[in-house]
Amino acid sequence: MSGFDVLTRGDVLDSALQARDYLVDCGVPGALAAKDPRLWGRRAVDHSRLGWLDLPHASRGLLGQIDGLAREARYSGLDHIVLIGIGAESLAAQAIVEAHAPGGATAGGRAPGGPGPAGAPPGGLTVLDGSDTAALAFALERLDRTLVVLASKAGVSLEGDAYRRIFADAFRRYGMSEREIAGRFLVITDHGSPLHDFARQCGYRIGLTDPYLPGHFGALSAYGLVPALLAGADAERLLDEAAALAPSLAQEEDNPGLLLGAILGGCAQQGPGGVARDKVVLREPGGPGALTSWISQLLAVGTGKRGRGVMVFEPPGVQGEAPDVHGVALNPRAAHDDADTSLWAPLGAQFLLWEYATAVSGWLLGVNPFEAGSTVVQEAEDDAATMLRAAGAGPLPTGEPVAVDGDIEVHTEPLGPGGFAGGAGGLAGALDGLLGSVPADGYLSIVTYLSGDFSGRYLAPALARRAARPVAYGPGPGYPHANGTVHKDGPAGGAFLVITGEPAPGDALAAHPIPGRPYGLAKLQLARALAEVRALRQRGLPVVRLHLRDPVDGVGRLTEAVRGTSGSRRTVR
């Protein structure tokens, strides 16, 4: 596909045309083309924060710089790239490899649209974001052909530290010298960041990026391109696709980015009936993939501020019609019957198109889209780190469940912030109470912190039907890291189901201590969940945490409860 187009209809078209005319009258397309930061106030945005507009051309120099490393890796047989990164730093690379590399991408233990790690191709990209140990086990089986890329704009995350230690120890046990181990790591970070200094001390290869470039606008920077190129993706073709779109973004007419931004921002503002259509359901051919996840975090971070924001949902989480939801179909074969808007563009153009649209929609909503967001995401990670330090080798402060239904612990705070009267009814009562707490214009979010392959996707359709509201879902800590800004600083209409559990039987990696740390991945994952629950409750948002003592039977019982069929089996302590 070489062309690009955006078509919309109905009420969405009316809102979009009004918003587009307003944008043109205010000179937004011209100001963006000139990279004029005064669009967001005299001092709100630095000129360099708009450098993402130049990446389709500026990043070509990066390809030349990394080409030598790519040839060296291939000559050494390093055809398996492990990318350690949470959120924006990993999602773009994963989307590129899904679309453009023969080996595909493995994330959270499963290659989207393909077999699991045991049947995955030997090369390609494995993304480690803290959500599962299956992908880690897959990577550790291929140490002889693995190059590890650690990507972060700032310091290394808790998960990044854990995975780095695990791989360094595994390479050491494999018989490598410290110098050889250092050669197996590539760090991508901002110039002068804490990770930059750390990587230099370790002797790792380092790829430096512009510290002023917003991380969520960095798909066409080193964060997206370098891991994908090393994994075999055609990065030059990707930049060609983006460059073909760039001239149209300087126009007032026939500007697909302006129209898409007008659709998103215009719909997210209150219409004549007082309803803001600030929820978008994205439809990709073949089902949602990394591109949908990347768009979701881009809009979450770019617009989720000051009580405003655009949220993205996937089709399983939207059952029936809702007045505050509109659909966008990505590259459908024809205008999608279930979508208000259809968008056609190759992947490189998609990246630039959505970044431009996010900037425009942020302007319409009155927020600065280039801010990294508030400190809500970092606060939760810092809280998890504090818990782990305080616990040492002992247990984490999980609290007493208000009920135990079979092997499922129910944790609520009926009398505290973020709680409600639902604990006395066991599992069914807690779920009913949580669904009842979803506002008429709100949504439910499911975040799973489990070592197996169970996903909130399996619960979303039934919960969406019961709540008659959209349901978002994703694995922790990656999902709240990427989308936490809109949940906590956005419209504040969410209710949250957080699912934790004991490690799956036979999952030795989950319980095995991380080298140099008094905890394993399972404990780290639980700490992340507890910190996220606390952060949500501190903001007065309703939360239920369910802990599966038996992850196999617990998943079945929970699925039945969500469908409303587990009442006869319920035993409440």
Image (spheres, rainbow, N blue to C red):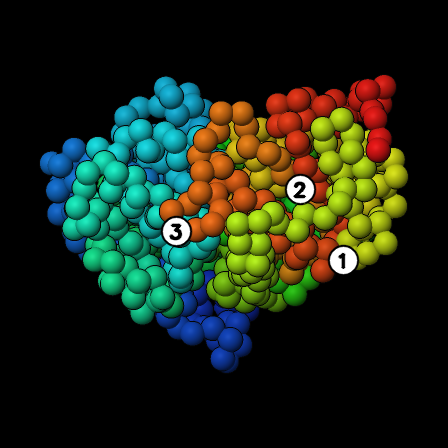
Tell which residue pokes out farthest to the bottom in this image. 42
Quadrant showing the N terminus? top left
Q: Residue at x 84, y 41 (%)?
A: 423
**Residue that carries the numbered disc 2 in the rendered image:** 498
Precedes in sequence: disc 1 or disc 2: 2
Where is residue 458 shown, x and y percent of the image? 63, 27
Q: Which amino acid, by three-letter code, is at mark 1?
A: Gly
With respect to residue 53, does 339 lie above or below?
Answer: above
476 or 286: which is nearer to us?
476
Distance between mark 3 and mark 1 Cα atoms? 37 Å
Residue wearing tag 1? 540
- Residue 269: give x, y in percent of width and height: 69, 57
Query: Which one is in front, 123 or 167?
Result: 167
| Cα distance between the residues tagged 2 and 3 | 29 Å
Instruction: Give the structural element (helix, strand or loop) at label 3.
Output: loop
Residue density around tag 2, few if under 14, some if 14–19, many if 20 or more, within 10 Å: many
Q: 10 Å neighbourhood of mark 1: few (<14), some, or many (≥20)?
A: some
User: Can you identify the residue that label 3 sits on?
Assistant: 516
Residue type at mark 2 is: Val
